[in-house]
Image (spheres, rainbow, N blue to C red):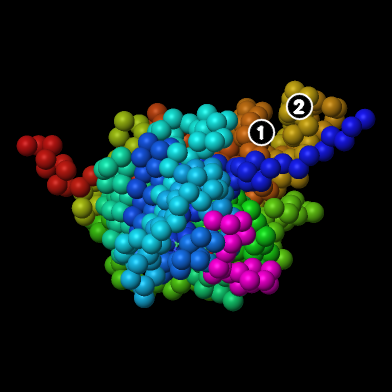
Amino acid sequence: MADIIQLLPDSVANQIAAGEVIQRPASVVKELLENALDAGATEISLIIKEAGKTLVQVVDNGFGMSETDARLCFEKHATSKIKTADDLFSLSTMGFRGEALASIAAISHVELKSKQPDNELGTCILIEGSEVISQNSCQNQTGTSISVKNLFYNVPARRNFLKSNTAELRHIIDEFQRVALTSPDVAYTFYNNGHILFQLKTANLKQRIIGIFGANYIERLVPLKQESDHVNIYGFIGKPEFAKKTRGEQFFFANNRFIKHPYFHHAVNNTFQELIPENAIPSYFIFIEVDPKSIDVNIHPTKVEVNFLDKRLIYAILGSSIKKALAENNLTPALDFETEPGLNFDFSADRPINPPQIKINPDYNPFESDSKPASSFQKEKDVNLPHWEKLYDSPIDIPTEKEYSVHFESKQQTNAEENKHNVVQGGLKYIITSVKSGLMIINQQLAHERILFEKYRDQFQSGKNTSQQLLFPIQLHFTMADSEIVQQLLPDLKEIGFDLEQFSQQNFVATGTPPEVLESQIQSILEQIIENHKAIKDFDKDRKINFAKSMARQLAIKAEKRLKTEEMTQLINELFACQIPDKSPGGQTIIKIISTQDIDEKFQ
Ligand code: ADP
Ligand code: MG
């Protein structure tokens, strides 16, 4: 048989290789912007037409290229950024593989103009499909301008694969924003089809975020800063109340390079979990700085996944630094309680804030389920976030249980009569009481849900549970699939007070339950726990939090339940002893204050 292997012509090989680096116009935008930053530019213009399909141009005022370099930069592996493989480990530039310009030149029409500061004239080069068409001296301001036209003109398959202009423009904007966030000290102008889309002045990070995402971000951002031997974390997180249902404003940067990191994303989301509605995603702009040696740099230039050696440690520090930031900014939560008599406690906001010390256990792995599930929550709490509770305790404006009841009781003793009138039930749903600034309205069901949730969660954490033995064991029946789950969950269920025994494949008996649970509720509560359990995929911790949520939701007093004054005061007392009194475990608002001014307006 004849030989069948042939070497591909260079031009074809280049086009194929180019496809790895340049997938769409946005890839060109990213590479050109990064090159401009590497060239020390302080002003960069991005000009695109037809979502980059006909033109992507980047003009910078960086240090430019010599005549030889201007020609060389389009060669494969042409880079000024590394000389040896070792250099990879101390990389401070965006580019390093010398592939971008070679790839772009293979699949488009490129015009490059570049001038170095000391030269009178610059160099102008035209290249089409890797072939140099012309090279001349030309007038140019110091810096570089690269125009990329007719992308994929010689790779129709790729060109056809491109999405609508709207979709491609979206990709370009994403890349632009990522680069712009890493370089607030650089001014950008971004023109789309002749119109300015973004004009960003030199700024600090906060101003840059506002410049990109809009002035209403001014009040949404909470600064984040945590330095340690292994990692420095800084940036901003969005306040919980502005978390959205859609993804979008979530940015991680590792050593000032945009990355995607689902594991770290989980760390952030988890920390916000009880503060935002289910399925909402908090915004964040988080910069992680580590020793370059502790990142796997041998990554594909277009890939944004990065491997950290210390990722478990960073996960833990990330979570605790966010908690600290939220607590320091009174986001857990701040209420206006300059109260009327009867609901009177010291609420002066000037109490000093003592940021917690963060101790980290490097062996901590939130993904590792403990061999003894009964204690894993405890372990996580102890080693990872020893100050979790303290964070919410004293530094913020929520009165402690003691503080609150001391005032309340003394008031009750001196003026029991007056006190009674301070709490009323509205619509069989709300507890209404007057505070200095107006009326405070508490949703009774959600309040109770919060109280129970924290109670069960704490039981998990402390390992102390109370179980009430049943006089007559109750028989329970589950489907095959659910029985499996119940079996798995037996140790956890025991922890919250459910003593269950399996006596056949689908049948169990309950011999004890948490004291609040009525016999008639046992089956339905367990079913709810199973349903919730099916919905979660990951971690040990989620499972237990979920348990607590299921129990709380089922057992909370419902709307339509008439409450006695004492019951209402007790509920308020317990609510304000909670760590997060104003949000239900599902993220709904429990407390609203209607200001006197608002009430006044209603009477006009
Ligand atoms: P890399 O960025 O990985 O080095 P590129 O193909 O993106 O590879 O660029 C090749 C080289 O061309 C760079 O190393 C740099 O020396 C030079 N270069 C590219 N763009 C610019 C620019 N805007 N200003 C100055 N030099 C540039
Ligand atoms: Mg580059």
Pointer 2 local density, CA inside 10 Å: few below 14, some 14–19, many at least 20: few
Magenta residues, as a range? 74-92
Hey, what amino acid is under mark 2?
A: Ala
Q: Position of residue 193 (x, y in %)?
A: 31, 40
The residue nearer to you, when weighing 333 against 425, is 333
Q: Is residue 86 magenta?
A: yes
Pointer 1 local density, CA inside 10 Å: few below 14, some 14–19, many at least 20: few
Hey, what amino acid is under mark 1?
A: Lys
For residue 598, say whether it is visible. yes
Looking at the image, is 515 positioned above or below residue 340? above
In the displayed structure image, the side of residue 302 where residue 225 appears, left or right: left
Q: Earlier in the sequence, mark 2 or mark 1?
A: 2
| Count of marks, rendered view | 2
- Helix, strand or loop status at disc 2: helix
Residue 481 circle label: 2
Looking at the image, is 237 positioned above or below residue 528? below
Residue linked to disc 1:
534
Q: Quadrant of the N terminus?
A: top right
The residue nearer to you, when weighing 405 against 220, is 220
Q: Position of residue 124 (x, y in %)?
A: 40, 57
